[in-house]
Image (tube, grey):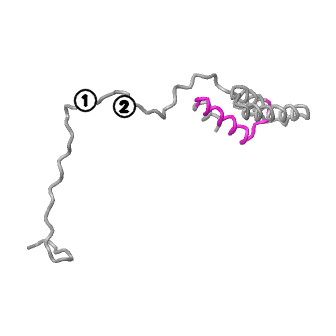
Amino acid sequence: SGQPATASGATPTRREPQQEATDANVELDDSSSDEDFDRLPEDTGPPLDAGYTEHDPTEEQSEAIARWRSEAAEAQANGDLKQAVARYSKVISCGGSSALTLTKRSEILLKQGRPCAAIQDC
């Protein structure tokens, strides 16, 4: 018969492709049921300092950076995210930028709904 037999000896029947159930006249509904609730609102905060410096901080600057890092961690632990970002930004702008400091600031920025600013720290 020209068609191969299956393991049971029966000849397979040919299936017709299924018709797509689309209608060209159907309009897309832009109702809130299709809204992406995980999408964050537009980031409207001010741009942050990237903190790139080539000089090594002085002893006094190193002490201040350590103090600001401590204050930032304490503010974050207390839920004062605005103060934590301000302190981490101060650390970064004064030459205390490290991967950990940038990551901590990015984490807080995401919690504040500022994904674009967080991405700049990456």
In the picture, measured across the screen, residue 40 lies left or right of residue 95, that is left
Query: Which portion, as a residue range, is magenta?
Result: 94-114
Give the labeled residue for mark 2: 33
Give the mark nearer the N terminus: 1 vs 2: 1
Q: Residue at x 75, y 31 (%)?
A: 75
The part of the image, by quadrant, that contains residue 16 is bottom left
Q: Residue at x 15, y 68 (%)?
A: 12
Query: Between residues 20 and 120, which one lies in front from this camera angle?
Result: 20
In the picture, measured across the screen, residue 63 lies left or right of residue 71, that is right
Which residue is outermost to the right? Answer: 59
State whether residue 11 is above or below residue 72: below
10 Å crowding of disc 1: few (<14), some (14-19), many (20+): few
Query: Between residues 103 and 39, which one lies in front from this camera angle?
Result: 39
Give the labeled residue for mark 1: 27
The part of the image, by quadrant, that contains residue 10 is bottom left
Q: Secondary structure at mark 2?
A: helix
Kindly report which numbered mark, 1 or 2, lies closer to the viewer in this rendering: 2
Query: Between residues 50 and 16, which one lies in front from this camera angle?
Result: 16
The N terminus sits in image quarter: bottom left
Residue 117 is covered by the magenta coloring? no
User: Residue 109's spot in the image, x, y percent?
Assistant: 63, 31
Instruction: Give the amino acid type for the residue marked by disc 2 in the picture.
Output: Ser
User: Residue 67's spot in the image, x, y percent?
Assistant: 84, 33
Numbered mark located on residue 106 in the image = none
Distance between the alpha carbons at the discs numbered 1 and 2: 15 Å
Q: Residue at x 84, y 37 (%)?
A: 56
Instruction: Give the amino acid type for the residue marked by disc 1 in the picture.
Output: Glu
